[in-house]
Image (spheres, coloured by chain):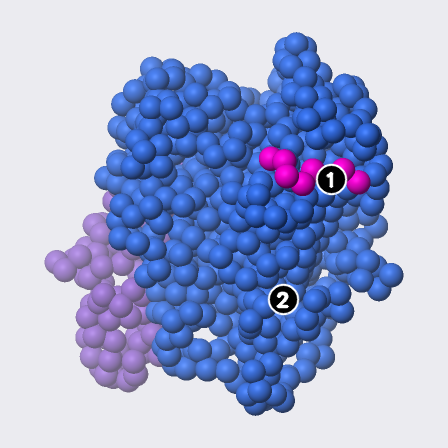
Chain colours: A blue, B purple
């Protein structure tokens, strides 16, 4: 790696900044130009004035750097949410561009005609803190549309005297009422406090424009008997959507771009129009997809459990426009899609016209999309149905949400987003499967079937076999600031399960885990690998809580670690995390199977030549496999794992990648400012760059759990 | 930062750095080292590098070879004589006053270094030739 002197850094920075003299900076929302700022004749101060290799933009007075009292000011010409920016020369040439959310901080979306101000802007050529191919635009959930709306129109108020059928009728009629307003006025079906026994039913279905709202998760209870009826407690969307016939891409779809070019813009008998959800996917490219050894051969139904068969790498996008053969969408492609692997676009349908041998896929694109629906302020329990069931399950929906709920005692994912786009699960307590075992019954949260750009934020996810699974998820999804703990199998409570991470099927990609607290981040490839996962500013403790409310105690005797990356899981990135606990202690004694064990101590990284041997507890366990137990670490994992700026309690220091010059860890990879739920807490709360005190505060979701546990 | 630089910006950045070779009283220098021991010092030309992007890749500038005009090549190498014995692994580029401008790695051909030699084992008094050298930035 070339290392520039300070003089060279400054000269390089000055040379670029000089090109911007008298130019402009434009902020955009997708392809929509929101606001243009004119730069000063001398656009930037001399590099090195404050930081070597960096230069601050000159503010409105034409002399001094931008600041609150000396901003650059412009008037917005359109409304929206910034996602990218570009700096242009006075002649109009683009000089550089970047992610607005990563490089600037905003205090909200912008309105047409609004005065906008740049009060802080420093340019540096110090390179990316994470290589660009590992990043994407993370603008998840409803953030891109101003957040979750608050519906105030109560369509119906229901009580425990109303039957299941009465309430479902109200939900259906509320949807009709929303349609009657042209989709402009959201409708609330309000459930009074009490327990609603819906055993023996198919559970509630919530459609577009409707919120099912209780009186609080400690007041309104929706309960089913877990009787094998295989239905969730509530569904948003239409259950079991199918994939329509597709149309091939005629040009490769390129990562970070917003268009795909198709052989035909009519798929499954439907002409694609603005607002449609489309699925982009391709046949498996072995450079990215490793199905592993547990799924069946090509064409086997097991290769279509969570995606269009044999097409695990995909993404869901929302269409903005169709011009000729070019379809423009409003999120960037998180991964490239190749014509060499028959990349195509399909949509969702109900299976009409599909091929029974392919699970009725390949038919009509006729599924009504559910949007702007939500479930709020109630408790659900005892949903059933494994992978198609659970407690709360969204299917093929966009801009829908689950907020402030308690979801407990599930069989199947407690909360599952299947084939969803920009949906959100937040501020909730998701816990306690009744079946803490592999196989689909014991999972906490799911992000499956190409689900893309969704957000799980500020939740507690506790007491499951696995706390997160991402099965053929589509990228752009974020788990932010959740507390996740106590994952286990009932027959192996002394072996630490995988913690948070994109897991358990091929080929999740470009998912972000930020600000969470969990015993570990781990990826496994039992049903296929994952690629391009990013862990940023999390605290991975390397110890399960073993909370007293568990049905049986846990013991972290085996496979205890802070981070694991298992075989064939490639290009996972770790920046700014804190690993381990202050004062951590090794365990020894007799495990739950009457075998003795002794952890001896802790080590920075597991021995790659004895990667699966229990011994000192590693902060990093790379290239192992929790099922096949190879001795040697997978070299492809060692070669592609990126670690930079992580603190651990073994070295008691931050460890940088010596080949990366940029050591400025941004506050967030998806938030532009401190989120409201952090309240008075320090943000970021994980500050690996401060080795003397790498945890600036506690996580609110963790605080809530401790308060519940100790009450 | 999450920047994507234009070709113009890449070239401006690269040129700004390589132009520093001429900032001293004379021509700049390439010092091939075994860690901290200088094995050979090769005097660069003034100008030391062609304009960035001339080879068709924005942000890349080839060193000027022995003829003082064209990029280094097998027929137009930069040449010097070793002043010490050792295995080259790093290099410094300095101005004529020995201010270090940038540093990089040295490997044998195919080893992936920022500068490659056909043989990194250098003996005192040995003739050294640079036949390929491209500075890439940022």
Contact flag, marks 2 and 1 (Cβ < 8 Å): no
Question: Pointer 1: what residue?
Answer: A197
Q: At which x and y percent is residue A548?
A: 76, 69
For the residue pair A159 and A266, the one nearer the viewer reads as A159
Question: Pointer 2: what residue?
Answer: A519
Span shown in magenta: A195-202
Tell me: residue A49, above or below residue A103: below
For the residue pair A703 and B33, the one nearer the viewer reads as A703
State the SS at label 1. strand
Residue drawn where x is 57% and y is 90% of the image: A596
Q: What is the quadrant of the N terminus of chain A in the image?
A: bottom left
Chain bearing tag 2 is A
State the separation of the CA atoms marked 2 and 1: 36 Å
Residue drawn where x is 66% and y is 69% of the image: A544
Residue A496's tag is none
Residue drawn where x is 69% and y is 19% of the image: A174
Q: At which x and y percent is residue A511?
A: 51, 48
First reached walking from the N terminus: tag 2 or tag 1: 1
Dot 2 and dot 1 within a common chain? yes
Main SS of the magenta segment?
A: loop
A359 lies left or right of A447: left
State the SS at label 2. loop
Residue drawn where x is 37% and y is 44% of the image: A304
Q: At which x and y percent is residue A38?
A: 60, 25
For the residue pair A430 and A674, the one nearer the viewer reads as A430
B56 lies left or right of A192: left
Does the magenta-highlighted stretch encompass residue B76? no
Chain bearing tag 1 is A
Number of residues whose C-alpha sits closer than 10 Å to that of mark 2, classed few (under 14), some (14–19) or many (20 or more): many
A497 lies left or right of A160: left
Give the image quarter of residue A365: top left
Q: At which x and y percent is residue A247?
A: 30, 26
């Amino acid at each position: 790696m070339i290392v520039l002197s300070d003089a060279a850094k400054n000269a390089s920075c000055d040379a670029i900044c000089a090109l911007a003299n008298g130019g402009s900076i434009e902020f955009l929302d997708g392809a929509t130009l929101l606001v243009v700022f004119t730069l000063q004749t001398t656009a930037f101060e001399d590099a090195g004035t404050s930081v070597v290799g960096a230069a601050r933009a000159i503010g409105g007075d034409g002399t001094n750097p931008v600041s609150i009292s000396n901003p650059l000011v412009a008037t917005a010409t359109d409304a929206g949410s910034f996602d990218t920016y570009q700096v242009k020369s006075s002649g109009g040439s683009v000089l550089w561009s970047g992610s607005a959310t990563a490089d600037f901080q905003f205090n909200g979306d912008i309105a047409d005609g609004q005065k906008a101000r740049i009060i802080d802007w420093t340019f540096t050529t110090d390179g990316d803190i994470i290589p660009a191919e590992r990043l994407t635009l993370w603008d998840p959930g409803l953030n891109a549309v101003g957040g979750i709306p608050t519906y105030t129109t109560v369509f119906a108020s229901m009580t425990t005297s109303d039957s299941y059928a009465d309430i479902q009728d109200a939900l259906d009629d509320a949807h009709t009422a929303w349609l009657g307003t042209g989709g402009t006025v959201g409708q609330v079906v309000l459930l009074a406090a009490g327990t609603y026994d819906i055993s023996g039913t198919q559970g509630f279905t919530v459609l577009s424009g409707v919120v099912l709202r209780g009186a609080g998760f400690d007041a309104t209870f929706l309960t089913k008997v877990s009787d094998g009826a295989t239905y969730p407690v509530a569904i948003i969307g239409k259950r079991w959507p199918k994939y329509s016939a597709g149309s091939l891409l005629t040009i490769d779809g390129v990562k970070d771009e917003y268009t795909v070019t198709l052989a035909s813009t009519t798929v499954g008998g439907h002409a694609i129009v603005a607002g449609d959800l489309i699925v982009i996917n391709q046949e498996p490219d072995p450079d990215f997809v490793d199905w592993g050894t547990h799924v069946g051969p090509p064409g086997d139904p097991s290769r279509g459990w969570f995606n269009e068969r044999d097409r695990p790498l995909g993404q869901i996008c929302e269409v903005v426009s169709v011009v000729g053969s070019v379809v423009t969408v409003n999120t960037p492609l998180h991964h490239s899609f190749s014509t060499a692997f028959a990349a195509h676009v399909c949509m969702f349908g109900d299976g009409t016209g599909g091929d029974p041998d392919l699970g009725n896929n390949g038919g009509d694109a006729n599924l009504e999309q559910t949007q702007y629906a939500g479930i709020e302020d109630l408790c659900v329990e005892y949903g059933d149905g494994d992978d198609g069931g659970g407690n709360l399950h969204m299917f093929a929906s966009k801009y829908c949400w689950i907020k402030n709920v308690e979801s407990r005692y599930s069989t199947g994912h407690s909360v599952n987003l299947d084939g969803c786009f920009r949906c959100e699960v937040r501020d909730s307590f998701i816990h306690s499967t009744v079946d803490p075992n592999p196989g689909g019954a014991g999972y906490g949260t799911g992000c499956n079937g190409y689900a893309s750009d969704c957000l799980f934020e500020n939740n507690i996810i506790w007491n499951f076999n696995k706390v997160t699974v991402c099965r053929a998820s589509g990228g752009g999804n974020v788990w932010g600031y959740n507390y996740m703990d106590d994952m286990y199998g009932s027959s192996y409570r002394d072996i630490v399960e995988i913690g948070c991470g994109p897991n358990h099927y091929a080929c999740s990609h470009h998912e972000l885990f930020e600000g969470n607290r969990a015993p570990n981040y781990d990826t496994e490839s039992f049903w296929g690998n994952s690629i391009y996962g990013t862990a940023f500013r999390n605290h991975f403790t390397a110890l399960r809580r073993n909370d007293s409310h568990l049905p049986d105690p846990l013991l972290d005797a085996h496979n205890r670690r802070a981070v694991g990356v298992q075989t064939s899981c490639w290009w996972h990135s770790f920046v700014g995390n804190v690993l381990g606990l202050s004062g951590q202690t090794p365990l020894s004694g007799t495990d739950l199977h009457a075998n003795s064990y002794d952890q001896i101590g802790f080590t920075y990284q597991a021995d790659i030549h004895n990667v699966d041997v229990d011994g000192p507890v590693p902060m990093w366990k790379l290239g192992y496999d929790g099922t096949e137990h190879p001795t040697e670490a997978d070299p492809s994992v060692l070669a592609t794992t990126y670690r930079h700026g992580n603190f651990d309690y073994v070295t008691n220091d931050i460890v940088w990648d010596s080949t990366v010059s940029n050591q400025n860890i941004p506050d967030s990879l998806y938030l532009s400012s401190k989120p409201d739920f952090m309240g008075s807490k320090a943000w970021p709360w994980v500050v690996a760059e401060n080795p003397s005190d790498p945890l600036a505060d506690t996580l609110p979701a963790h605080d809530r759990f401790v308060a519940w546990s100790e009450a | 930062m999450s920047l994507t630089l234009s070709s113009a910006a890449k070239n401006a950045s690269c040129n700004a750095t390589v132009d520093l070779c001429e900032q001293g009283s004379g021509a700049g220098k390439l010092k091939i080292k075994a860690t901290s021991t200088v094995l050979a010092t090769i005097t660069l030309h003034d100008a030391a590098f062609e304009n960035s992007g001339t080879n068709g890749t924005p942000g890349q500038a080839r060193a000027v070879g022995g003829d003082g005009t064209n990029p280094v090549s097998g027929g137009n190498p930069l040449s010097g004589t070793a002043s010490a014995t050792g295995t080259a692994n790093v290099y410094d580029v300095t101005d004529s006053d020995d201010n270090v401008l940038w540093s990089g790695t040295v490997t044998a051909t195919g080893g992936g270094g920022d500068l490659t030699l056909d043989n990194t084992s250098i003996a005192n008094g040995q003739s050294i030739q640079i036949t390929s050298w491209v500075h890439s930035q940022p």
